[in-house]
Image (spheres, rainbow, N blue to C red):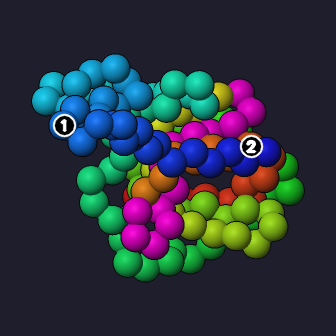
Amino acid sequence: MDYFRVQQFPTSPHPSQPSVPPTGFPPSQPIPQFPGGSPQHPPTAAPTAAPPHFIPQQPVPSLYAVDPGAISRCLYRNTYVWLRNGEHFWFYPTFVGRNSVSGFRWFGRFWAYYGIDLRRISTFTCF
């Protein structure tokens, strides 16, 4: 099952007071970066650049679920993912669990935190 979450900062009810990100750190302080993450605790930093401007050639699709060990080699790397339903997109994985992978999906103009069940992935390739 996919989950999709875009982090938004709440606006302050009073214009004179700055809004505080959900991390609890004031905007003037840097937010600590945590490698990896999970659906409950997503990493705080998306990639700073867009992915490559090409679609790689699709490897031979697998009849089985993607192995967590295989996709873990793509952690913190631009990865192109093809799903069994025909969707395909650039992905930047930051966490691999036994049954899922999470990270940031490219939506054409921005990265958003995203997770994928490994059984839904047909193939992937990373750079």
Q: x, y (%) of residue 61?
A: 75, 64
Pair 2/1: label in front: 1
The correct choice, above or below, for 120 with respect to 93 in the image is below
Q: x, y (%) of residue 54?
A: 43, 79
Q: x, y (%) of residue 120?
A: 78, 52
Q: Is residue 1 left or right of residue 53?
A: right
What residue is pinned by disc 1?
Answer: 16
Q: Quadrant of the C terminus?
A: bottom left
Most foreground residue, 69 or 105:
105
Most foreground residue, 47 or 16:
16
Q: CA distance from mark 2 to mark 1?
A: 43 Å
* Bounds of the magenta segment: 98-110
Q: Quadrant of the N terminus?
A: top right
Most foreground residue, 84 or 65:
84
Q: Is residue 35 visible?
A: no
Q: Earlier in the sequence, mark 2 or mark 1?
A: 1
Residue type marked 2? Asp
What residue is pinned by disc 2?
Answer: 117
Q: x, y (%) of residue 32?
A: 27, 23
User: Dot 2: within a 10 Å radius of its alpha carbon, few (fewer than 14), some, or many (20 or more) residues?
Assistant: some
* Figure label count: 2
